[in-house]
Amino acid sequence: MNEKALRILEYYKIIDMLKENTVSSMGRDIAAELKPSSDINEVKELLQETTEAVNLILKKGNVPIAGVQDIRGALRKVKIGSALDPGELLRVADTLRAARRLKRFIAEDKREESFPIIEYYIDTLTALKNIEDSIQNAIISEEEVSDHASPLLHTLRRKIKDKTAAMREKLNHMITSSAYQKYLQDPIITVRGDRHVIPVKQEFRSNVPGIVHDQSASGATLFIEPMAIVEMNNDVKRLRLDEENEIQRILQELTAMVDEKYDAVKTNMEILATLDFIFAKAKFSLQYRASEPRVNHDRILNIKKARHPLLKPESVVPIDIYLGQNFNTLVITGPNTGGKTVTLKTIGLLTLMAQSGLHIPAGDYSEVAVFDEVFADIGDEQSIEQSLSTFSSHMTNIVSILSDITPNSLVLFDELGAGTDPTEGAALAMSILELLHKQGIRTVGTTHYSELKVYALTTEGVCNASVEFDVATLRPTYRLLIGVPGKSNAFEISRKLGLRDDIIKRAKEFLSQDDVKFEDLIKSLEDDKKKAEEERDLATRLKIELERSKLDLDRRLEKLEAQKDKIMRDAQREALEVVKKSKEDAENLIRELKEAISRETAEKAALLEQTRQRIRQQESQLEEKIGEAVFRKPTHVPPKDLKIGATVRIVNLNQKAQVLTLPDVEGNLTVQAGIMKVNVNIANLKLEEDEKPAAHKSGSSRVSTVKVRSIAAQIDVRGQLLEEAMMNVDKYLDDAYLAGLNQATIIHGKGTGVLRSGILQLLKSHSHVKAYRSGGFNEGGIGATIVEIK
């Protein structure tokens, strides 16, 4: 991948952000060397390892990879036989500890989810706890070896301590002695060159026999080691030399342990550095809410809700980008500062990130292509002056790009053809785009030229796009509209900024009629596309809500079916228990009778056998009846010639219902059971028989018969005003009473509760109401009231 494109598209800023998420210098080194790959298999593997690391962090929390140290220098010393110092050994121990912790971390709940790439790396790590513990026990800090590193070192340090204490005691005795005090500059003990000395005045040099080790700057004070402690100082010196030798031996011994496992230690270091880099990619992904893109070698881009990672997340506007299916060249137009250049950089940078194995800040199921090269000619911030040198610079870059492109390249042009005469610049831009288009090279360019908009409209495989601009607020919305050419909005912006109307009117007169019609067409297309997107978004939301409702209803139905099966199983178990107990009781009775008459005649034995047979026959009948009651569906003849409004009974639910639709060819129809509409098969229905009329019918009886045939078991007053609803409910209750209904349902809905409160007040004092209650789970809940009629 060419370095110029990486620099222009600010790829190295992403690398710097990635490096901040590493915990070791070795991981940072790997991140710093990361470059996009053009091998699709390598890209897929790099993306997969990032995804595995993200999933692992989400599942188990932060990975214990802290403590990984750069021990490359230490291992080089080991290789040449040099002993490691305490600090280097501690870094080796830290690295070994990190490897061991990581192995234990991944081993926990390993069977729940698989992370093949990461597990492979971690399984390759070697736990070297003996080396880790040996170093930890022997080394206290980067400059100190523990007293317990060896018995000899402990003994030597104890002797040094004792000798030093005895020597200081002797010196203390001297400096506190009245005989010496007049000779001393200060009554203190100090050290010069590892030798304990006392400060003696120059003029009393001869009064304190000993060895002079130093003197003050003025020469007035001599630091003398008294002869009385010279031998003691010599003993301490010898002990310290022995101590140094023992420390060196211990360090050499620990280094030999590392050398013995050199390959394993080196492998651990390299794998931990790699894992540090992989988890840095995962942290970057989580930090920027990125996702793994699909990759293809068909040169297709389809990035959803793309966000430039270098922009502030709270202010960036996601854009949808697609290229390579219906068209291979995209021409983006629109006003300055509208987001054209950001769109170009987003396309290029997200492509480079994906080819580097990084998740991209975009929506799920986004798709990117793996290109051989990404080329970009993108200038800096636009300046007031546009000179020939600017045009020459851009053209030099374009010439270089055209000489290096391959069929599998992505080319990005910012303000193609700008910086020179507009007519010539537009002609050059169209010629360059046509050349790349004929070769099938994926190209995205930005422009202000109307000629390029027309070129994109009239050329197959070339598509217009624009960045949206809100004229009302004079602010860009940064939304990318693919399929719609952009409008410059120069007149509208100028008017908003205060330019006089007569100037703007005169400017419009200079435009050709074709230009005016073209700009009006662009505006119409933008408005139509915006309206279509709004309608599409509304349809999508409605579809999601319907699917959610369907899932909820399916779950409820599944729950009801499960409850039904449980009830049936419980009934079966209970029935079988009854049968079993009956059998046991019968057997016990027979046994007792048999024992009672064991000494009687054969005739009584025969009588006993007959009794036993009768009991068994009764058992079988009992078992048969229980089985029928629990499992056998009642036999009935499906109704014929059903009519809408007929009253039927749903056999398996034992629930009355009214027919709403006639059966189809398969016998399926819809019935109303309470407040619920149920789809059933006609085989699961039977007609409800009307009550037989009494011998002498009065007028009221005839009225009741007519009413019962026409009155429904419920009334729905949802959407009515309170007064209207109460009037309808009052009349309905009179009709229900005359029809002889025992129970009725009033559907008033939940809403604000006004209808429900008013109806409850009516029911409290109504003469035909025996009792009332809110609907149950399958009766509409508090949106319905069940009334018992007197």
Image (cartoon, rainbow, N blue to C red):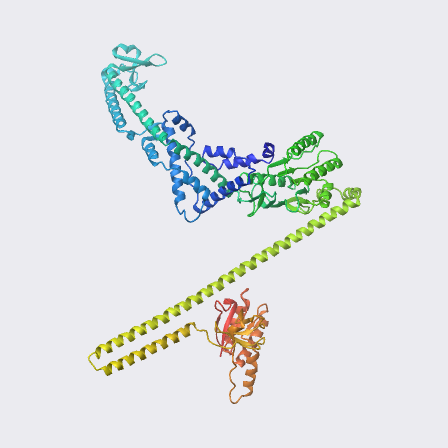
Is residue 357 among the parts visible in the rendering?
A: no
Q: Nearer the viewer, residue 735 or 584?
A: 584
Q: How many marks?
A: 0
Give the residue at the far front of this rendering: 602
Q: Nearer the viewer, residue 70 or 790?
A: 70
Tell me if residue 432 comes above or below residue 623 in the rendering: above
Give the residue at the far bottom of this rendering: 696
Can you tell which quarter of the image residue 350 is in? top right
Give the residue at the far left of this rendering: 599
750 relative position to 508: left or right: left
Is residue 585 among the parts visible in the rendering?
A: yes
Can you tell which quarter of the image residue 728 is in? bottom right
Tell me if residue 762 comes above or below residue 29 in the rendering: below
Q: Residue shown at 39%/44% (left/top)?
A: 107
Q: Which quarter shows the N terminus?
A: top right
Q: Nearer the viewer, residue 298 or 783?
A: 298
Measuring from the top left, give residue 404's x and y in whole percent.
Answer: 64, 33
38 relative position to 270: left or right: right
307 relative position to 49: left or right: right
Q: Residue shown at 25%/12% (left/top)?
A: 209
Measuring from the top left, give residue 88's x and y in whole percent.
Answer: 38, 29
Measuring from the top left, give residue 258's x and y in whole percent.
Answer: 36, 30
Q: Nearer the viewer, residue 178 or 33?
A: 33
Measuring from the top left, give residue 719's x and y in whole percent.
Answer: 59, 67
